[in-house]
Image: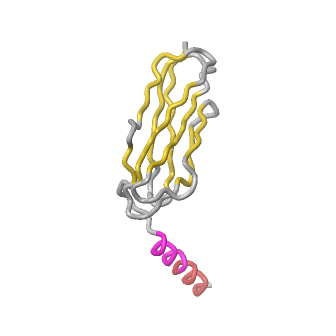
C-alpha cells in the first residue's frame, strides 16, 4: 500500500515538473478587464470582445471560460495561441432581466494557476 502511494505521489510530481504552471501573468490585456455597457435596452443583447496578447515564451491555451449565470455567454479563441499572438473572449449579456447587473467571468489558461477575472456591468431599462 505504501509503495503504491509513493508511486502515485511521484507520478504527480513528475507531471507537475513537465507541465509548469505559473502565478505570473501570461497575457497582456488590450481591452479593459471591467467593461461597463452603460444603459441597455430590455431584450437587446449586447456583446463585448475582451482582447489579449500572449506574453509567455510558450504557446498558451484557454482551457475554459466560466460565467456566473445563464444570462451571460462566452466564446473564445480555441487552440494554441503562440507567443506574441493575440486571442479574444467574446461575452454576450442577454438583457432580459431589468435592473443593474454585474457579472464575473473566469478565464482559465493552461499555464496559469489562478483564472483571469473579467467583469461586465450595466443597467437594463
Vertical relation: 67 (above or below) 41: below
Q: Position of residue 38 (x, y in %)?
A: 45, 19
Q: Percent from the top left, x then y, of residue 49?
A: 49, 36
- Colour mode of the rendering: secondary structure
Give the prevailing secondary structure in the magenta stretch.
helix
Asked if residue 34 is positioned above or below residue 45 in the image, the reply reads below
The residue depicted at 54 percent of the width and 35 percent of the height is 91
Q: Magenta span has 63?
A: no
Q: Residue furthest bottom?
A: 3
Front residue (pair 30, 121): 30
Q: Which residues are magenta?
A: 11-19
Question: Along the horizontal axis of the image, is 8 left or right of 30?
Answer: right
Residue 73 pos. (x, y %):
60, 36
Q: Quadrant of the C terminus?
A: top right
Number of numbered discs overlaid on the protein picture: 0
State whether residue 43 is above or below residue 113: above
Q: Quadrant of residue 124?
A: top right
Determine whether 15 is above or below 62 in the image.
below
Q: Residue at x 38, y 59 (%)?
A: 56
Task: Write down the quadrant of residue 20 in the picture.
Answer: bottom left
Task: Pinpoint residue 55: horizontal percent, then vertical percent.
Answer: 37, 55
Amino acid at each position: 500500500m505504501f509503495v503504491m502511494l509513493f508511486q502515485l505521489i511521484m507520478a504527480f510530481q513528475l507531471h507537475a515538473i513537465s507541465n509548469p504552471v505559473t502565478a505570473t501573468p501570461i497575457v497582456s490585456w488590450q481591452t479593459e478587464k471591467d467593461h461597463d455597457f452603460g444603459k441597455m435596452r430590455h431584450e437587446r443583447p449586447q456583446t463585448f470582445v475582451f482582447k489579449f496578447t500572449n506574453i509567455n515564451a510558450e504557446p498558451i491555451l484557454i482551457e475554459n471560460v466560466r460565467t456566473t449565470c445563464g444570462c451571460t455567454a462566452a466564446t473564445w479563441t480555441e487552440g494554441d495561441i503562440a507567443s506574441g499572438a493575440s486571442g479574444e473572449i467574446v461575452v454576450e449579456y442577454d438583457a432580459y432581466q431589468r435592473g443593474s447587473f454585474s457579472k464575473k467571468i473566469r478565464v482559465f489558461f493552461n499555464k496559469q494557476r489562478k483564472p483571469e477575472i473579467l467583469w461586465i456591468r450595466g443597467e437594463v431599462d
